[in-house]
Image (cartoon, rainbow, N blue to C red):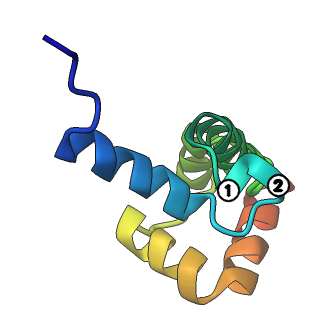
Amino acid sequence: MNRVSNTPVTRRRRKKVLKQAKGYFGSKHKLFKTAKEQVMRSLSYAYADKYGIRYSQFIRLLTLAQVKINRKQLSEMAIHQPQHFDILVNKVQNP
C-alpha cells in the first residue's frame, strides 16, 4: 500500500507557510521547502532586530525604573503608538 502524503493537515500546514512566503523572490514563494526556510529565517530576523533588547531585560529594567505599566498596555502601545514605545525603550535603556 502506498503512503498517503497529501492529508488535509499537511495541505493546511503547507498552505499556511506558502501564504506567509507570499511576495518572496524566485522559488522562495513557490516551493514548500525553500519557502519554509525563508519564513523561519525572516521570523527570526523580525524577532531579533525589533528593539535591540530582550523582553526579559526590558521588563526587568521597567521594574527598576519604577514604571507601572502592564504587559497588555505595553503591547497596545507597541502596536498603536510605536513612537511612544520607542521613547519608553530608550528611557529604560539609558537612565
Side (left or right) of 25 relative to 4: right
Q: Quadrant of residue 73?
A: bottom left
For label 1, count other residues whose C-alpha is less than 10 Å away and answer few (under 14), some (14-19) or many (20+).
Answer: many
Query: Which residue position is annotated with label 2?
Result: 26
For label 2, count other residues whose C-alpha is less than 10 Å away and answer few (under 14), some (14-19) or many (20+).
Answer: few
Quadrant that contains the C terminus: bottom right
Tell me the CA gap for discs 2 and 1.
7 Å
Above/below status of 31 relative to 21: above
Question: Is label 2 in contact with label 1 (beta carbons under 8 Å)?
Answer: yes
Query: Which residue position is annotated with label 1?
Result: 29
Residue 29 position in % (x across, y down): 67, 56
Residue closer to the observer: 34 or 7: 7
* Residue at (70% x, 71% y) in the render: 88
Amino acid tagged 2: Gly
Amino acid tagged 1: His
The secondary element bearing badge 1 is classed as: helix
The secondary element bearing badge 2 is classed as: helix
Q: Quadrant of residue 48?
A: top right
Residue closer to the observer: 49 or 1: 1
Quadrant that contains the N terminus: top left
Residue closer to the observer: 81 or 19: 19
Residue 94 position in % (x across, y down): 86, 55
Residue 60 position in % (x across, y down): 56, 42
Residue 61 position in % (x across, y down): 64, 47
How many numbered markers are drawn?
Answer: 2
Extreme residue in the top direction: 1
* Residue at (35% x, 46% y) in the render: 13
